Image (cartoon, grey):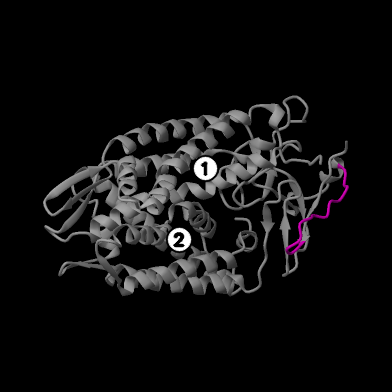
Amino acid sequence: MNVLTARAAGLIGCTRCGRVWPGEASHCGRCGAPLAPVTTISLQRVWAWWFAGLIAYVPANMLPMLRTATLGHEQANTILGGVIELVAHHNYGVAAIVFIASIMIPVAKFIAIGYLALIVAHEKFAGSHRHLHLYEVVEFIGRWSMIDVFVVAILSALVQLGFVASIHPGPAAASFALSVAFTMLSAQNFDPRLIWLPPLGTDKA
Amino acid sequence: MEATFPIACRPFGQDYVLPMNESVDHMSELPLSELIVCPKCDALHRISEVGPDEQAACARCGTLLITPRPLSFLHVIALSFTAMILMIGAIFFPFLRISAQGLSHNSSIFGAAMAFSEGFLAPLAFAVLLMIVALPALRFAALIYTLWPLAANRPAWPRSAQAFRLAEALQPWSMAEIFVVGTAVALVKVAGVASISFGPAFWAFGTLIIVTALKNAFMSKWSIWEAIGPR
């Protein structure tokens, strides 16, 4: 289907409220949001947050997430260490949940955003509905990674039974939270309109 | 091939649009206020009357553009007030209680955020409070401010556009529902070691999630922007 875009018509659309303005407008006259032209320059912001997220993700995995003390025996666990311990205690279900939520999904998000940001500049893939769906999934799932930080907060606040058992948060909680926030910003800065950008030189704009 | 210029309209629950073969030249005669652009793919559509049982989707990528719902403003205001009251309850009542081997400990939602308050993790305590309490509350307040005059068919109050834009921008960062699911995960983790009981704040917070979901379902962004009108 050959569809007329605001860009091809010399207009600019507000991505917040859907209103259409002349191409030279800088702010939406209705909702006041800045109007962004459809250009690959916006990918620079995506990459900047992407790398920030990746850098924060390294200490999130190296440093302890939880410090657990039970009956005088203290133990500091990284994310992966926690999964391994759950497997050792034959809690395979919980281990699988933690592994998927804390390791697989964050890694998959980095791959998905990086893939989208690389692929949209390639005219061969212009207008792929699969890419839009991938973007929507990443945008939806991104904030749910914060669940780990909340679990650490709840466990640390709740499990304060003195000598019997107590849990304290580790420094990885902060870098994990930062990593999630940076990845969310990276995804938010990705302009899905780029997915539909036709091969350069064939459209009017 | 001539570019098509579809009308943004489709019957509710059905998966097609009504394309209209208007030429591109014809479009220059239309005022811009009669057009709507898809935020996901930049396709231009002409706005048409969308009935109460219909919703308009983008002809190219299927993104919902207009979802009018009758009575939506009043519903959203009522639900936002409900959510604010539940939030106050959720902060001040006890949230969870743990007991094991004769020892027990209470925690409030505030206490959960304050788990990070020691040492250099303190900024994280602030961020968690923002995400689960302050930002959701600010969103509800901004929505009430925007919709209160609109529900009474009066002109929007000054800075309504900014308030509604703020409410929309804060949506990904208000994570109350994620916190509640996090509670479930935490419970699974300690289930074998200790017994947990829920305080009133847990039920208030749980209800808050349902109220928030209902409010999002009742809200039609396009209708609100139309009602706020040009500044």
The N terminus of chain B is located in which quarter? Answer: top right
User: What residue is shown with label 1?
Assistant: A188
Quadrant in the rendering for residue A76: top left
Query: Which residue type carries mark 1?
Result: Gln
Q: Look at the numbered disc 1 and give the secondary structure of its residue.
A: helix
Circle 2 SS class: helix
Name the spot of residue A52 as percent of width and height, x first. 40, 33
Residue B74: quarter of image: bottom right
Q: Where is residue B40 in the image (x, y as percent from the top left)?
A: 65, 45
The residue that appears at 62% across and 40% down in the rendered structure is A192
Relative to A169, is B228 above or below? Answer: below
Q: What's the magenta region?
A: B11-23
Residue B116 highlighted magenta (yes or no): no
| Chain for numbered disc 2 | B
Whether residue A25 is visible, yes or no, is no
Q: In this view, does A52 lie to the left or right of B29?
A: left
Label 2 is placed on what type of residue? Arg
